Image (tube, rainbow, N blue to C red):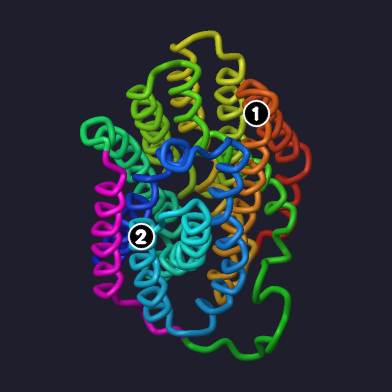
Amino acid sequence: MEKLWNRNYCIAMAGNFMLFFSFYLLTPLLPIYLDARFNADKDIIGLVLSGYVVAALIVRPFSGFIVDSFNRRKVLMLCFFFFFICFTGYVGAGTLLMFAIVRTIHGLPFGATTVANSTVAIDVLPSSRRNEGIGYYGLSNNLAMAIAPSAGIWIYDVTDNFMLLFWISLVVALLGFWCSTAIRVPHRKPVEGKPHLSMDHFFLTRAWLLAVNILLFGICWGVMANYVALYGKEVMGITDGTGIFFALLSGGLFVSRLYGAKSLRQGRLSENAVEGALISSVGYTLFALAPGEWAFYVSALLIGLGNGRMYPAFLNMFISVARHDQRGTANSSILTSWDVGMGIGILLGGVLTQYWGFSAAFWFTAGSQIAGTALLIAFTRRFFIRRKLA
């Protein structure tokens, strides 16, 4: 069996960890920061935070085309450098408008770097271990998500200093950029007969129903990730407990990806996706019911277990309906769809919490997850099987 944990794959995972650690260190605390520093209403907070999603959404289709058309290592290095340098903007943003501009601009290199890094990771994987390797690759995201929010909340509780968090994110992103300079990518031969311009350069049209399905799941993540800290502080009075929530969420993601690696290697993609979607549906519904603090934590674990099973399966499904010269486009397509969902979730989550309360926002989230699960079972599974390439 070919070696999975080769040097370049490990470096790509390390870079991905740094990318997401620097990003998620700030994510749960930004609503609190905007509220404390600028006295912003929740709907305004939602608008400001959704800026990066809109920017990432705009750049990702082009990122897939660029990654598929040019030297992937150089593209990755350039994108990572701009991602790192954007953290300096948070330090200097003295007004809400300036912060909104910086946050939006930061979405451009974030969107491009996630596409480039994941595509490079797929390139350095042996073909016989690709499904399994894609599943493991996501562990670097999950580990970052397990540590970063908890670390950020702990540092803020101890120091009450947001500027320190911005500087820590800057340094971690710099380490990620250094990883991108150390990776080596195998040479790719140009594909003969490839059309000069087509929609598939920017979005994988063969996977359109998969994209709709992942969008519905992205809505849930947009609401949950961005408003759970504010909910914990204002409703449950457990600011420290938000760190535990993210640790349990990420622990579930981590365990689920490890457990699901074997079935991914066996090609059981749609089965993994359905199982994960069902578990996540239970988690989001339990959170919306809010029967007590125990549900707050149990739902985090269930959502993590479900998404850790579901997302790698969907990513492999996108890759499986794409040609080998469309890996960048396949990566950008699933991320674009996820971003659209997250953007909708952040915006609507802000409006719903401002005017109808947290309960309305979280029931909307549960409804979106259940609708996505029903679509997956009824239509998307068969759609994938029909379009899967050998």
How packed mark 1 is, by other alpha carbons closer than 10 Å (few <14, some 14-19, many 20 or more), is: many
Task: Residue 285: name its quadrant.
Answer: top right
Between residue 69 and residue 153, name the one nearer to us. 153
- Mark whose residue sits in front, 2 or 1: 2
The magenta segment: 161-188
Across and down, in percent, residue 14 comes to 28, 58
Q: Which residue is drawn at the image coordinates 24% and 37% (left, top)?
A: 155
Between residue 165 and residue 176, name the one nearer to us. 165
Give the residue at the far right of this rendering: 379
Residue 92: give its label: 2
Asked if residue 351 lies left or right of residue 170, the reply is right
Q: Which residue is drawn at the image coordinates 57% and 69% (left, top)?
A: 59
Whether residue 1 is visible: no
Asked if residue 390 lies left or right of residue 68, the reply is right
Residue 361: give its label: 1
Judging from the image, what secondary structure is the residue with disc 1 in? helix
From this view, report whether residue 341 is shown above or below residue 108.
Answer: above
How packed mark 2 is, by other alpha carbons closer than 10 Å (few <14, some 14-19, many 20 or more), is: few
Q: Which residue is drawn at the image coordinates 55% and 47% (left, top)?
A: 313
Across and down, in percent, residue 148 comes to 32, 42
User: Which quadrant is home to the C terminus?
Assistant: bottom right
The overriding secondary structure of the stretch rendered in magenta is helix
Amino acid carrying mark 1 in the image: Ala
Task: Residue 62: name its quadrant.
Answer: bottom right
